[in-house]
Image (cartoon, rainbow, N blue to C red):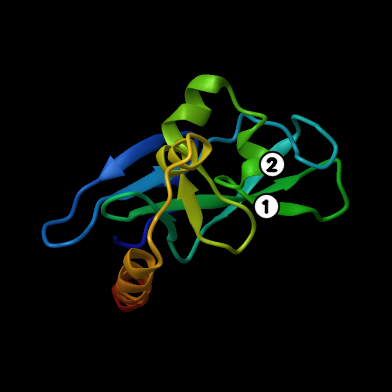
Amino acid sequence: PTARKIADVRDKYDIKSSKGSYNSELFGYTDGKCPHRRSPNIYATNVNNSVKMIFTSHDPRFVQGIGLKCKDCNGSQWQSYEKTYVDTLSKRKQNELHAVVSGKRVGVDMGLIMDMRLGATVSPRDYISVEPQLLRELGSSKSQISMAR
């Protein structure tokens, strides 16, 4: 994915395609509430410098969001794709992200979560072979963004 300006991401969800790479999702809604005080007085501070990888049952997804800050809190900040914030958005917008992202960890697609709730499991052999590949691809995506600046 290419580096973006805050206006490219703020208040929208979009999927960007690039030939030869995975799609990049933009998730920058600002109409939710502060996850700490539930205040609607929030604003965008910056575009995330890196993309967040989301594990799926197939190819990984990559999402880029924006940093948000509350005018009523004393310096609390979070990302537009973090679960505590996404939970304050409308169901339609929550479903657009269709993943759970918590803090600095990689995200998990809701399809995987539903499979696990229904009792599906992944064999350790599959996990061991997929995880290093996904982490290499994440590193490659991050370096491409750094070079694009």
| Disc 2 + disc 1, Cβ < 8 Å | yes
User: Which one is closest to the eye, mark 2 or mark 1?
Assistant: 2
Report the residue at 80% width, 32% height from top: 38
In which quadrant is the C terminus drawn?
A: bottom left
Q: Secondary structure at mark 2?
A: helix
Viewer-side residue, 26 vs 47: 26
Q: Is residue 125 left or right of residue 68?
A: left
The quadrant the N terminus occupies is bottom left
Q: Is residue 33 left or right of residue 97?
A: right
Q: Residue at x 45, y 37 (%)?
A: 97
Q: Closest to the observer: 47 or 1?
A: 1
Q: Amino acid at mark 1?
A: Trp
Q: Nearer the viewer, residue 104 or 76?
A: 104
> Compared with residue 60, is residue 14 higher up or lower down, i.e. above or below?
above
Residue 79 located left or right of residue 146: right
Q: Nearer the viewer, residue 147 or 20?
A: 20
The image quarter containing residue 100 is top right
Is residue 6 something one can see in this rendering?
no
User: As drawn, is 28 to the left or to the right of 69?
Assistant: left
Picture residue at 39% right of the left edge, 55% below the top: 122
Mark 2: few/some/many CA within 10 Å (<14, 14-19, 20+): some
The image's mark for residue 62 is none
Q: Residue at x 76, y 33 (%)?
A: 41
Residue 84: numbered disc: 2
> Can you say whether 11 is above or below 108 in the image?
above
Q: Position of residue 27 (x, y in %)?
A: 46, 42
Q: Compared with residue 7, is residue 107 higher up or lower down, i.e. above or below? A: below
Residue 47: give x, y in percent of width and height.
50, 56
Q: Which residue is mark 1?
A: 78
For badge 2, the amino acid type reads Thr
**Picture quarter containing residue 35?**
top right
Question: Mark 1: which secondary structure?
Answer: strand
